[in-house]
Image: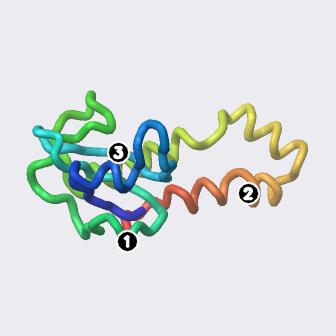
Amino acid sequence: MKLYKIEASNFKAFFGTPEDRIERDVITIAQTPTCDAFLYLSNETYDELELLDSVPAGFDFTYCQEWGLTIDDDVVDRVILDLRKKAYPSWQDQLDDIYHNGIEGWKADTITPIKEKYPKENS
């Protein structure tokens, strides 16, 4: 997944207004204490956002508050793993899927799309 930064001043241009909302496939993970910049994760490429190689200083982690406020590259990897875990169906539903569609159907239709959307390594 790609790590992006957006300045609050560009928020409306990127997401639109409440009346004309632009849907984006991004996950907010952090913000500055003054809310003048935000960090997002996405598989999509957005030329209008600043693509980052690592987490910059000065951001508070907002994805999962009980994890604390420290954000770094390891936390980003943990977010991706958490998103991946939450995307999988329950084991009961997965067994039902295997019963009805076979192992190959389960892998192709259920598991592979999740693995592709939330890759384990931060990229």
Rendered image quadrant of residue 30: top left
Q: Looking at the picture, how far across and down is residue 3, in whole percent?
A: 32, 61
Labels 1, 3: front one: 1
Front one among 40 and 82: 40
- The disc, 1 or 3, on the residue closer to the chain's N-terminal end is 3
Which residue appears at 41% of the width and 67% of the height?
46
For badge 2, the amino acid type reads Lys
Q: Amino acid at mark 3?
A: Thr
Gap in angstroms between the C-alphas marked 3 and 2: 29 Å
Query: What amino acid is found at the position of numbered circle 1 in the picture?
Result: Asp
Q: In terms of secondary structure, where does tag 1 sit?
A: loop
What residue did someone put label 3 on? Answer: 28
- Split into 4 quadrants, where in the image is the C terminus? bottom left
Q: Where does residue 35 sit, x and y in percent of width and height?
A: 17, 41
> Which callout, 1 or 2, points at the residue further toward the start of the chain?
1
For this view, does 19 lie left or right of residue 78?
A: right
Return the residue at label 1: 47
Report, in whole angstroms, how far the alpha carbon at label 1 lies from the one at label 2. 32 Å
Judging by the rendered image, the residue that carries numbered circle 2 is: 107
Q: Residues within 10 Å of mark 2 (few under 14, many from 20)?
A: some
Q: What residue lies at 27% left-to-right and 52% top-to-bottom?
A: 39
